């Protein structure tokens, strides 16, 4: 199909949601790019960051896992998670492999490309930054909270989100946005997956300047918990647009109608997987993106 060869698509986010979106874009091959959040500090990723430093690898590993189409010994190794009572318990071998390459002074993006080639993953996977940073949030009471896991557990509404320290975006990610025909935000955790890459000024500016691309927001299928669950969809769209220096989101895609979103074009369509209603169906996502690119 010529669409897959002519159009470039960039999806921004992290973890399960971005992996799902990228798997729906698999037919675009190298014309599809995922820009992945790198601020996670929980689970195996958090333990590795605490001991070894570096960026968070968990969301990148998750995306690669969902794009593996040819199971092999290599893919089984990459997905392997240790069990037992020792220090390795709960660690994912893929995280450790990427950390080892980082420790060998391999550039993070080169490390990802090495793993992609090994696992025959065609879609580009780019970390939002190659420098360690954490998510930082300001609560309504004036208290600052640092770290994704702490942000997720905030009992109060938050009024500001930023990265600490300030770090540069990966230049290849910025270039992919500049040449994209569609830029997709979500699905995924709003505060800890979608927002972190948008907090990088270079990414916000690249989205602002690419006026020819369709900027698409994909809604989640189930309500979020924590502080993200206290933010209305309208407010989330406004946060995204503010980070993109006022660039308007062109299309909001979801299963429910939103009369309150009079200022946005909304596309209401079935998105859920037939056997798990909280998870997006790859074929339905693919169909939506293709129809928007064909307009």
Image (spheres, rainbow, N blue to C red):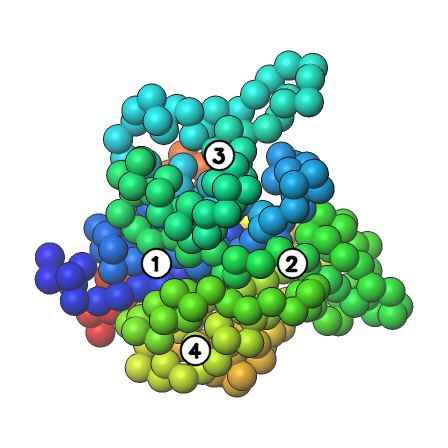
Give the labeled residue for mark 2.
Answer: 133
Is residue 105 in sight in this rendering? Answer: yes
Q: Residue furthest top?
A: 84
Residue drawn at x 31%, y 36% as measured from the top left: 118
Q: Residue at x 61, y 40 (%)?
A: 45
CA separation in Å, label 2 and label 4: 21 Å
Mark sitting on residue 33:
1
Task: Point out the residue furthest to the front here.
Answer: 104
Q: Residues within 10 Å of mark 2 (few under 14, many from 20)?
A: many
Element type at marker 1?
A: strand
Give the image location of residue 258, x and y in percent: 51, 69
Q: Quarter-wise, where is residue 158 in the image?
A: bottom right
**In 3D space, how far apart are the residues under numbered discs 2 and 3 (Cα atoms)?**
20 Å
- At 83% from the left and 69% from the top, the residue drawn is 140
Residue 84 placement, left or right of 80: right
**Contact flag, marks 1 and 2 (Cβ < 8 Å):** no
> Secondary structure beneath disc 4?
helix
Determine whether 213 is above or below 39 in the image: below
Helix, strand or loop under label 3? helix
Q: Nearer the viewer, mark 1 or mark 3?
A: 3
For label 2, the SS is loop
Instruction: State the residue position of label 4.
Output: 206
Disc 3 or 4, which lies upstream in sequence? 3
Labels 1 and 3: the sequence-earlier one: 1
* Nearest to N terminus: mark 2 or mark 4: 2
Residue 104 in the image: state x and y as whole percent. Answer: 50, 42
């Amino acid at each position: 199909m010529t669409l897959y060869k002519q159009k470039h698509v960039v999806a921004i986010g992290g973890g399960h949601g971005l992996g799902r979106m990228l798997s729906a874009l698999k037919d675009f091959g190298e014309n599809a790019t995922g820009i992945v959040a790198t601020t996670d500090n929980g689970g195996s990723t958090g333990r590795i960051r605490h001991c070894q430093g570096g960026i968070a690898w968990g969301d990148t590993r998750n995306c690669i896992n969902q794009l593996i189409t040819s199971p092999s010994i290599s893919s089984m190794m990459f997905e392997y998670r240790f069990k037992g009572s020792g220090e390795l318990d709960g660690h994912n071998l893929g995280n450790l492999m990427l950390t080892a390459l980082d420790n060998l002074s391999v550039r993070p993006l080169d490390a990802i490309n090495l793993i992609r080639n090994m696992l025959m993953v065609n879609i580009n996977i780019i970390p939002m930054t190659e420098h360690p940073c954490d998510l930082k949030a300001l609560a309504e009471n004036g208290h600052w909270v640092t770290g994704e896991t702490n942000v997720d557990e905030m009992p109060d509404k938050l009024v500001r989100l930023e990265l600490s320290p300030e770090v540069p975006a990966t230049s290849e990610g910025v270039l992919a946005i500049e040449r994209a025909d569609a830029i997709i935000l979500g699905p995924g955790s709003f505060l800890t997956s979608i927002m972190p890459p948008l907090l990088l000024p270079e990414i916000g500016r690249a989205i602002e300047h690419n006026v020819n691309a369709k900027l698409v927001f994909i809604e989640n299928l189930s309500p979020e918990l924590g502080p993200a669950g206290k933010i209305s969809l309208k407010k989330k769209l406004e946060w995204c647009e503010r980070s993109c220096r006022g660039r308007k989101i062109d299309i909001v895609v979801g299963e429910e109608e939103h009369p309150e979103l009079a200022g946005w074009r909304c596309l209401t369509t079935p998105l859920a997987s037939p056997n798990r209603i909280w998870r997006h169906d790859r074929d339905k996502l693919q169909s939506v993106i293709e129809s928007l690119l064909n307009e």
